[in-house]
Amino acid sequence: MPRKTSGISRSCPNPECGESGTNIIRYGFFQLKRGKRRRYRCKACRKTFCSTTDTPYYRVHGSRNTFAEACHLSVEGASISTIARVKRKTWNTVYRWLERARTACKAFNENNLKQFDIKEPQADEIRTFVDDKKKTTWVMTLLETTSRLWPSCLVGKRSYRNIRRLFRDTLSRSECHERLLITTDGFKPYGWVIGRMFGSHCIYGQVIKTYRNGRASRVKRSLVIGTTCQLEEALSDSEDSTKLNTAFVERHNLTIRQGSAYLQRKSSGHARQEENLAGHLHMFQCYYNFIRPHMGLKFGTEVRTPAMVAGIVKTKLSFRHVFSRMIFFVFRILEGEGRPAFEMAA
């Protein structure tokens, strides 16, 4: 006789059904080379499924640990060929694994990377190429300095339209309760976008660096929007900045280059398609925000992730959490505040 599930809440993977809770029952086992696996059944639509249905683990010819280790190597700068040699898998197998992981991480970011405070954003770009060095493309990033959260990323041309998309995506995910302190480089579309989107509701400054022999020989700081008094007040309230700077987003760009084989200089592992580069950045964004401890956010003996500091989650996650349908988030209200946040379910 089928028995009701207990302890863990599951939902039906059938998009036309979506039932969960007591409507999902245990429905025997099925045999694999590594042992038996539990089968489940939805009493509403009578569909059967296993615990890995609609996850990257579904019908993966390998263990979940091997799959997660391959993803860890990918976001730590290893190329697909390197991962294939280390894990003794074919190149095509590793490519398919990472393709699944990128899709899952992108969906995880869209569903969970939201409802955070934004106070001091910094924006910058990374220059790279796709397939051929003549085909220059840009990776536009935006970093929230206070929590070191990386909310938005965009791959494409360095244009007014893409800069506007970058800031719109960040604003759609975040909540702003005070005047922002925004800092960028001297790229003109930044001033146009920020002036139209924020106007006098922000303090905007530019940091323009002049390089000589590979080193910054001159740094010019200019206040574009706001008054000097407003800037001094914002800098005094800032926990990280004492003057206008783009140091945090520039250091973040270095972290991205080190974590992506597609962006490493003088390497044969560059991206052949723009979709692959964008997909890998989605996976690295998930890893950076939710999984990778940030040493700049260390509090005593506890090393936190940017998502923990931003109040999105309460604990450090792993790729197993991201890839599994069995991990759910409980919606609750933070004490003393009127905005929602997410907490890991027990």
Image (cartoon, rainbow, N blue to C red):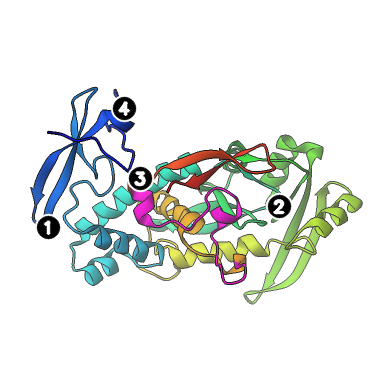
Q: Is residue 266 above or below residue 118?
A: below
Nearer-the-camera pick, 254 or 15: 15
Q: CA distance from mark 1 to mark 4?
A: 30 Å
Q: Residue at x 24, y 52 (%)?
A: 96
First reached walking from the N terminus: tag 1 or tag 4: 4
Instruction: Give the percent coordinates (x, y) of residue 298.
Output: 60, 68
Instruction: Give the percent coordinates (x, y) of residue 311.
Output: 59, 49
Amino acid type, residue under disc 4 in the picture: Glu
Q: Is residue 53 above or below residue 314?
A: above
Q: CA distance from mark 1 to mark 2?
A: 50 Å
Q: Which residue is mark 2?
A: 120
First reached walking from the N terminus: tag 2 or tag 4: 4
Q: Which mark, residue 207?
A: none
Which quadrant holds the N terminus?
top left
Q: Which residue is mark 3?
A: 103
Q: Are marks 1 and 4 in contact (CB under 8 Å)?
A: no
Q: Residue at x 83, y 59 (%)?
A: 236
Magenta-colored span: 298-323
Amino acid type, residue under disc 3 in the picture: Thr
Q: Which mark, residue 34?
A: 1
